[in-house]
Each structure stands twice: as structure tokens, then as C-alpha cells.
Image: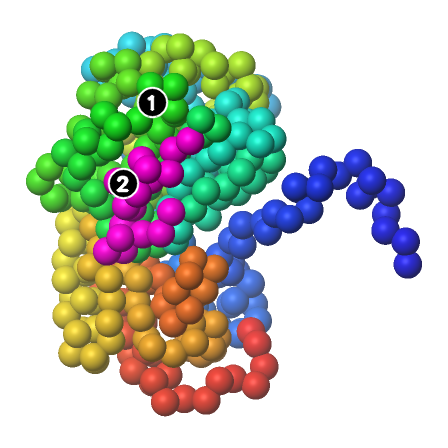
């Protein structure tokens, strides 16, 4: 059978790309199992969105027949105020993943090099490969980004470096001092995309002063999102902070209306609900302690995490354990794609959800693999 003629115009490098595999939707699992399930696969906030955000969504629904503000003026203005920046230093995206890809679209051409770490967020790799860039992956050190090794990997062809802090899926982070030292070693022309999607969950001293890089005019794009602690993952809204010239370059390529009106309204309201953020962070800390203590009692290894998820090493094939847990009504993420063949990434949920996960984990320890898949 001859290949479809569309492949005659598909670039050769594009054929090698493996698309990002999203988590299994809870609706699909519940439909197949015929009962309710719990989703601990995508690092979502188990408390959901701020009530203020929900009310803001209701108030703007009668205007969704109109195109949104393509410049996101009010949300950008509020973000600039919060971070002590100018309006021209803020850009909005359809989630931070939109901005991760936008950085590559803006600056990479085929043959340019982009660097990230092995076992980092898969979208970093895709963003480089989607533009025909040469992907350079540096091994991790102690389960986090080896900044010294990444600096050594920079060549004259390097244009962009992706760093996740904290890193997904390991939940580890590097310090502000370590990043300071790293940036001093880089050529000024290299763009560093610093993904801080889990910023609000990190309570560790000396973690980050990334906004200072923006104020100093460094070649750093700081990314934050409303998908995690603010509970707005379904609306796809995130933002980037950088020097005005960087933001101007990104806006040349940015898709018009990439932040929809409902998302902008919800995000603006969520920013001012500090109580909801505090409750979300407190719940995560309490339940992280509970889950890790129970895993220790079970003799199950895990990577200590500063995010809202854990990398759990059962010592068994992660795809098989994923299926076992799926049949128990528990959705997690197998981590074979990230180089952890015996590990699952598990989001920290509400107490009752975490109890269900732990109970299911105990039951599947010696259970056979289900003959059929859900």
C-alpha cells in the first residue's frame, strides 16, 4: 500500500517525533469500569478552582460570543503589579506548555541545538524537536538537573535551554544560588526557559529569585501557570515573564487570542484569592507527609518531592502496576517514557483519595496482571 501523498511534504525530522501522551481521562476510565474512579495522574489541584474564579467564569459567560482581549491587558497588568514588573514584560499563554513551544518556534531553526535534561518534562523535548532542532539531553545528577553538566554541553549552535524547577516528574529542585552560578557560565545569547509551574508548593528556603533575573534584563523566560495550585488546568492559562525585547520577539509568533476570555477572567479572580492558594498548599503539605509516611511503612521507595506529586518506585513494571491500579479505579501515570521503568507518578490528592490509592497499592502488591485492559 502506497503512503498517502501528504508524507511527501512532511519534513523528515517531523516523522521521528513521538507525540506527548496525555493522561487517561477519568471519564473514559469510569465508562469502561462502570463505576467511579479517582484521578491522581496529572498533578491537578484536588480542591479545584477558587470560588472567586468560578464566580468570575459565570459572570463572563454571556460574552463568550465575542473574541477575547488578544493582549490580555487586565490580567497582564495585575501580574505585572504582583511581580513588580512593567506590562511589556508579561506574556500570556494557553497554559505554560503553549509558551514552552512558543519559545522554540520563535528562536529555533533546523540544526540549532536545544538542551534539557533526561527525565525532564517531555514537552521540553518536543518543543525542540518540533522545530527540527537538535535535542541535547544531559543526564540528571541526584534526580535533578545537573546544571554544571548542562553548561558544559553548550556549543556555538546552542540557542535555548529548558529547565524545570521543580522538575516534573522527579519533584526535585535546585537552589537560586546554583542557578546564579549556572547563568554566569552561559553565553549571554543563550535563552534559558525556566519553568516554575509548581512554584507555589515549594517551601524550601533559597529556592528561587527568578523574577530578579527578569528585572536585571537577563536572557531568561520565567514561566508560571494557573493549572496547578490555582486549579484551572481545564481552562489552559499560564504566563511568562521576561525582558521587554524577549517578550516582543515572542509576540511576533504568538497565536492571536491564545488566552481565551473565560480563562483570563478566572485567572484574574484566582490571583486575588490568597486563602484558596494557602489552603491548597497546606493540604498538599499535610497529605504529602501522610502518603510518604505510609509508603515508608509499606517498604515502597519514593523520591522526596517539593511539588504536589511523588515519583513512586514499586520495583515492578510500571505499565503493569498502572493497569492493576486502573482496575482498582485509581488513575496514575507510568513513567517508563521518562526513564523510570518501575516508577509511577502519583498526584497528592484529598485524604480519602490518598487512602484509596494506598489501599489499592497494598492489594496489587501480589496480584496478577489483569487479562483485559480498561
Q: Which residue is mark 2?
A: 147
Q: Which residues are magenta?
A: 138-155
Task: Tell me which corner region of the image, top left, top right, bottom left or bottom right, holds residue 244.
Answer: top left
| Image quadrant containing the N terminus | bottom right
At label 2, counting other C-alpha atoms closer than 10 Å, the crowd grade (few under 14, some 14-19, many 20 or more) is: many
Is residue 90 visible to us here? Answer: yes
Answer left or right for 77 relative to 125. Answer: left
| Nearer the observer, 64 or 194 | 194
Percent coordinates x, y for residue 96 in the rendering: 41, 34
Q: Earlier in the sequence, mark 2 or mark 1?
A: 2
Reply above or below: 318 against 1.
Answer: below
Q: How is the image coloured?
A: rainbow
For label 1, the residue is: 187
Q: Is residue 120 above or below residue 72?
A: below
The part of the image, by quadrant, that contains residue 151 is: top left
Q: Are marks 2 and 1 in contact (CB under 8 Å)?
A: no
* Image coordinates for residue 126, horizontal then vertical, percent: 53, 42
Q: CA distance from mark 2 to mark 1?
A: 14 Å
Q: For the residue labelled by badge 1, is the local secondary structure a helix, a strand or a loop?
A: loop
Is 50 above or below relative to 45?
above
The residue at the point 35 percent across, 29 percent down is 192
Task: Specify the farthest residue to the left.
Answer: 205
Image coordinates of residue 357 in percent, x first then y, are 32, 72
When asked about the image quadrant of residue 51, the answer is: top left
Amino acid at each position: 500500500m502506497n503512503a498517502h501523498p501528504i508524507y511527501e511534504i512532511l519534513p523528515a525530522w517531523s516523522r521521528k517525533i513521538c507525540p506527548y501522551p496525555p493522561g487517561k481521562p477519568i471519564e473514559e476510565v469510569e465508562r469502561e469500569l462502570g463505576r467511579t474512579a479517582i484521578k491522581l495522574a496529572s498533578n491537578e489541584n484536588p480542591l479545584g478552582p477558587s470560588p472567586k474564579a468560578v464566580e468570575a467564569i459565570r459572570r463572563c459567560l454571556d460574552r463568550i460570543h465575542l473574541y477575547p482581549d488578544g493582549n490580555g491587558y487586565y490580567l497582564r497588568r495585575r501580574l505585572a503589579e504582583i511581580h513588580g514588573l512593567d506590562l511589556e514584560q508579561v506574556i500570556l499563554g494557553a497554559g505554560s506548555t503553549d509558551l514552552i513551544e512558543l519559545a522554540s518556534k520563535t528562536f529555533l531553526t533546523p540544526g540549532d541545538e536545544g538542551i534539557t535534561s533526561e527525565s525532564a518534562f517531555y514537552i521540553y523535548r518536543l518543543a525542540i524537536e518540533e522545530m527540527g532542532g537538535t535535542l541535547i539531553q544531559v543526564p540528571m545528577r541526584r534526580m535533578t538537573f545537573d546544571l554544571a553538566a548542562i553548561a558544559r554541553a553548550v556549543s556555538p549552535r546552542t540557542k535555548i535551554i529548558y529547565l524545570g524547577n521543580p522538575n516534573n516528574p522527579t519533584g526535585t529542585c535546585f537552589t537560586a544560588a546554583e542557578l546564579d552560578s549556572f547563568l554566569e557560565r552561559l553565553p549571554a545569547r543563550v535563552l534559558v526557559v525556566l519553568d516554575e509551574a509548581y512554584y507555589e508548593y515549594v517551601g524550601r528556603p533559597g529556592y528561587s529569585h527568578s523574577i530578579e533575573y527578569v528585572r536585571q534584563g537577563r536572557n531568561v523566560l520565567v514561566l508560571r501557570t494557573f493549572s496547578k495550585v490555582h486549579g484551572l488546568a481545564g481552562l489552559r492559562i499560564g504566563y511568562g515573564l521576561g525582558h521587554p525585547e524577549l517578550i516582543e520577539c515572542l509576540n511576533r509568533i504568538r497565536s492571536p487570542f491564545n488566552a481565551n476570555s473565560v480563562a483570563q477572567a478566572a485567572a484574574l479572580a484566582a490571583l486575588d484569592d490568597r486563602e484558596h492558594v494557602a489552603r491548597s498548599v497546606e493540604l498538599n503539605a499535610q497529605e504529602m507527609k501522610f502518603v510518604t509516611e505510609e509508603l515508608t511503612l509499606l517498604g515502597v521507595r519514593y523520591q522526596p518531592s517539593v511539588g504536589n506529586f511523588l515519583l513512586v518506585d514499586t520495583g515492578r513494571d510500571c505499565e503493569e502496576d498502572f493497569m492493576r491500579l486502573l482496575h482498582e479505579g485509581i488513575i496514575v501515570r507510568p513513567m517508563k517514557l521518562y526513564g523510570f521503568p518501575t516508577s509511577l507518578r502519583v498526584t497528592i490528592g484529598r485524604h480519602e483519595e490518598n487512602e484509596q490509592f494506598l489501599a489499592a497499592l497494598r492489594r496489587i502488591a501480589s496480584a496478577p496482571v489483569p487479562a483485559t485492559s480498561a
